[in-house]
Amino acid sequence: DTAVSQTPKYLVTQMGNDKSIKCEQNLGHDTMYWYKQDSKKFLKIMFSYNNKELIINETVPNRFSPKSPDKAHLNLHINSLELGDSAVYFCASSQGTSPNTGELFFGEGSRLTVL
Amino acid sequence: GDSVTQMEGPVTLSEEAFLTINCTYTATGYPSLFWYVQYPGEGLQLLLKATKADDKGSNKGFEATYRKETTSFHLEKGSVQVSDSAVYFCALGGSGTYKYIFGTGTRLKVLA
């Protein structure tokens, strides 16, 4: 009964393709996030949604488009994949938007490899 | 802007050794401070946190004290085990922002 689940766990694709990663949380949280972790383990926030509203949109190429159909789901679509997009993408959720009160719960990650 | 600096890894220790992983931060306002741990092949999970100066967070034998005067939140454990091998991330949050700011992570390897 996974709290934050992502699919797929592994994704291998060619440059130029379009791919999506899906995330679902069953914790009843109202805030969800996408993080990118590079090969050196550096973790960078990409997007965050609170109750389906975009509240964090970092400097990310517009080939990346998040979508939150409801507060339990946050998907990430990537167009025209490039070699540099290879990374592990983590979905996370928290209750509330304030890090002072909300712990982040992470999914297991989706490892994207672009060839 | 806000930032977190952690010691570079990897840190390699023998079982039962004492562990310190240094973390310092720069922030406006009064952030909360966190340590997250990432075991191989898994997502990050909260290890401990402190929400104000002089608070001590502790969990599973790990502890860290929020030191405002030195802007530090060093992670310590008195006796590490092989099962503690993981990547440890220091993070801050709050300070009027929605964002958590993570450090670069420190890999710990404990040898039997």
Image (spheres, coloured by chain):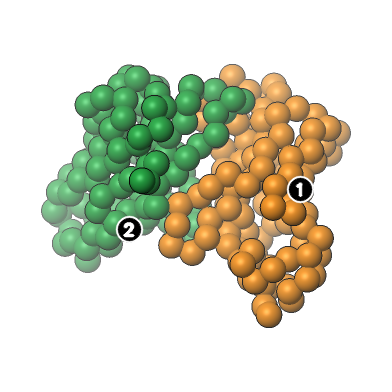
Chain colours: A green, B orange
Picture coordinates of residue A91, whole percent (x, y): 38, 42
Q: Is residue B43 left or right of residue B82?
A: left
Q: Chain of mark 2?
A: A
Q: Amino acid at mark 1?
A: Glu
- Image quarter in which the N terminus of chain B is found: top right
Q: Residue at x 74, y 54 (%)?
A: B61
Residue picked out by circle 2? A111
When the figure is inspected, residue A114 is found, relative to residue A5, above or below; the finding is below
Distance from disc 1 to disc 2, alpha carbons, whole Å, reads 31 Å
Q: Is the residue marked by circle 2 packed among few (<14), some (14-19), or many (20+) residues within 10 Å?
A: many
Picture coordinates of residue B51, whole percent (x, y): 70, 29
Q: Residue at x 20, y 45 (%)?
A: A20
What's the mark number on residue B63? 1
Which SS class for mark 1? strand
Q: Is residue A79 left or right of residue B19?
A: left
Q: Residue at x 54, y 23 (%)?
A: A98
When the figure is inspected, residue A111 is found, relative to residue A89, above or below; the finding is below
Farthest bottom residue in view: B112
Q: Residue at x 50, y 37 (%)?
A: A104
Picture coordinates of residue A49, whole percent (x, y): 36, 26
Between A25 and B8, which is closer to the camera in this rendering? A25
Q: How many marks?
A: 2
